[in-house]
Image (cartoon, helix red, strand yellow):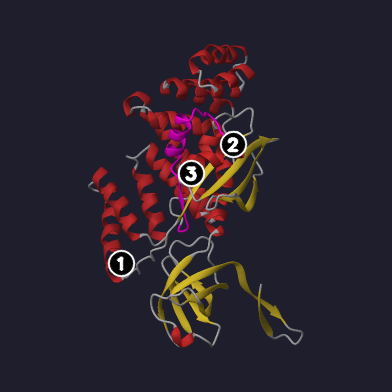
Amino acid sequence: NRLIRLYFNHKRYKESIPLCQRLTGISPSDKIAHYQLSIAYKGMGDYKGCVGAATKACQVDFADEMCWHIMEKGVLDLDWQRVGTPLRNNCSKRHLEMAQQYLGLGNTILAEYEYKKATRLNPQSIPIRLGLAKYYEKQGALPESIEELKKVVELDPENIEAKDKIEMSWKQKATTVSPLLPDVKKRRVAIIFSAKNPIHLEIDKIAEEIIEELLANSFTIFPVATKNIQTQMDNIGLNTVNNLQEAVQLARSLQASYLLFGEIQEEKGRVCIESQMLSLLGEKLKKEREFLHISRNSDSLTKCLSCLSQDLSNFFPIHGELISSSRTSVTLNLGEKHGVKPSFICDALDPDGHKIAEIEIIAVNNSTSRGIITTISGRNQLSPHNRVSLRKGQVVKVEKKKGGKKEEKKK
């Protein structure tokens, strides 16, 4: 195993294949042996061999998420005819089931991720397209829902359900006026993981790709593309990033303003991700925050990364605009909301960035938020397009007095 990992670290995949094959012959029920062989084939560009070895690893341990990720990489890189439809269907069905499960649990971020994964694996599946269209409809994303329904009609021109939904969606879209998102500059963040796990290889690259996709809709972060990170690593001769100094050098070369550097470990059936956010804006590094995410079982890498992506988006202030205001209430546009809930507090700002009023959020929907003005001063200065900034971690807490009356406090 040590020699195999040494070959992998130096990208000597061709020399590692005989060793991996020998290991699978000695221990055919060892999932790690098949997993390592799939990595070796993938490194050589033999995606058919990669899929075959990863499939055997999945058969040994169906719940191991890493084996599935490697197999899907091979499936997506293979030509449609060469990989065969049944394997694509099996992979896509698995992700469709997970999407429906996450949707039932209310985890919309992971539900969307799984729907998109299923669609990429089997783009001609009508049930998957319909499921994704219904998901977008529930989230209020009508244009995206209509696009998916159009693709269903292209695949099945006689699909009455899709045709009816397109007509209804167009009518709803015509009556719904969505405010324009405020023009907010996102923070350019390089996300780099170091895999401390001696067993699962390429877990760092997989994690970077997953979190990039999870942050695709972030209103506060613009992640540096993983392909750009990998290209830069190839240019400077790095196969893995083993320390913070290398990560900082890599992030600066990609002109990132911030760096999230994380270390992934898997032991005793659990995944642990320790990470830290560093500011690269000055000459001196500044540690902004540390994160720790631990899963309860071995198939929760994606869940850990989902929680981390939400924490990253929430780390930076969410900025938006005031759409309209009355004497006591306002309608706000906070763009893509990550965890914005009633009782959260916003500051309304004048053109110079000075606070003029305080707003408590009382209702949140897919496109706008409603709030009440909690300060008297500055109320008359509010007007459409005033900037608003959501305070992180501060809410209005309702406490009961001894007499039974409610008292509001800021927490």
Kind of residue at badge 1: Gln
Mark 2 and mark 3: Cα distance apart in space? 30 Å
Q: Can you say which quadrant of the picture contains the C terminus? A: bottom right
Compared to 338, does 158 lie above or below? above
Which-is-in-front pick, marks 1 and 2? 2
Q: Earlier in the sequence, mark 1 or mark 2?
A: 1
Position of 406 compared to 112: left or right? right
**Crowding at mark 3 (Cα within 10 Å: few <14, some 14-19, many 20+):** some
The single residue placed furthest to the front in the displayed view is 283
Badge 3 vs badge 1, beta-carbon distance below 8 Å: no
The magenta region covers: 219-241
Kind of residue at badge 3: Glu
Q: Element type at marker 3?
A: helix
Q: Can you say which quadrant of the picture contains the N terminus? A: top right
Queried whether the magenta region covers residue 111, the answer comes back as no
Q: Position of residue 253 (x, y in %)?
A: 47, 41
Name the residue that disc number 2 marks.
194
**Crowding at mark 1 (Cα within 10 Å: few <14, some 14-19, many 20+):** few
Name the residue that disc number 1 marks.
172
Residue 210 visible (yes or no): no
The single residue placed furthest to the right in the displayed view is 402
Which-is-in-front pick, marks 2 and 3? 2
Q: Residue at x 61, y 40 (%)?
A: 244
The circle on residue 264 is none
Name the residue that disc number 3 marks.
97
Q: Position of residue 4 (x, y in %)?
A: 59, 18
Kind of residue at badge 2: Ser
Position of 396 compared to 175: left or right? right
Which quadrant of the structure image shows residue 219?
bottom left
88 or 67, nearer to the observer: 67
Q: Earlier in the sequence, mark 3 or mark 1?
A: 3
Q: Element type at marker 1?
A: helix
